[in-house]
Amino acid sequence: LAMYEDREENDDFGKWIPCSERLPEEEEYILLSFANYTGLDIGRYEKDGENDKFYPGDEEETYARYGLIVNAWMPLPKPYKEKTE
């Protein structure tokens, strides 16, 4: 039980990380939350010179272009992998 409690305290998985606190690694797919929309989406982050930009999936247009404001993110879980014996 202590192992799980320690992991929960030190692991970002399953916890929202405010953009004001820390930004994700570039080109990594992440789950995104928005300040002005109740839905969630999978996107990516890129730093473009002085600007920080979030993009939906593999799209070329930013969320800002659609009027969406990303306020937090979290890492995606690892894909399911069937155990083989």
Image: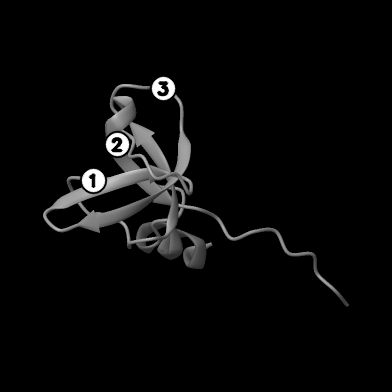
Residue at 40% in and 61% down:
11
Residue at 36% in and 39% down:
61
Front residue of 18 and 56: 56
Q: Secondary structure at mark 1?
A: loop
Residue at 21% in and 56% down:
48
Front residue of 1 and 69: 69
- The residue to which callout 3 is attached is 38
Q: Amino acid at mark 1?
A: Cys
Residue 50 visible to an observer of this rendering:
yes
Q: Which of marks 1 and 3 precedes in the sequence?
A: 1
Residues under numbered marks 3 and 1 in contact, where contact means CB atoms less than 8 Å apart:
no
Task: Tell me if 63 is positioned left or right of 59 in this view.
Answer: left
Residue lying furthest front in this view? Answer: 60
Front residue of 84 and 41: 41
Residues under numbered marks 1 and 2 in contact, where contact means CB atoms less than 8 Å apart:
yes
- The residue to which callout 1 is attached is 19
Q: How far apart are the alpha carbons under marks 1 and 2?
A: 8 Å
Q: Quadrant of the C terminus?
A: bottom right
Determine crowd level at label 2: few under 14, some 14-19, many 20+ residues with C-alpha closer than 10 A. Answer: many
Residue at 31% in and 41% down:
72
Q: Relative to 79, does residue 58 appear above or below in the rendering?
A: above
Residue 17 visible to an observer of this rendering:
no
Residue lying furthest left in this view? Answer: 50
Determine crowd level at label 1: few under 14, some 14-19, many 20+ residues with C-alpha closer than 10 A. Answer: few
Residue 68 x/y as whole percent: 31, 28
Task: Tell me if 60 is positioned left or right of 4 in this view.
Answer: left
Q: Relative to 64, does residue 2 appear above or below in the rendering?
A: below
- The residue to which callout 2 is attached is 70
Q: Amino acid at mark 3?
A: Thr
Residue 26 x/y as whole percent: 33, 61
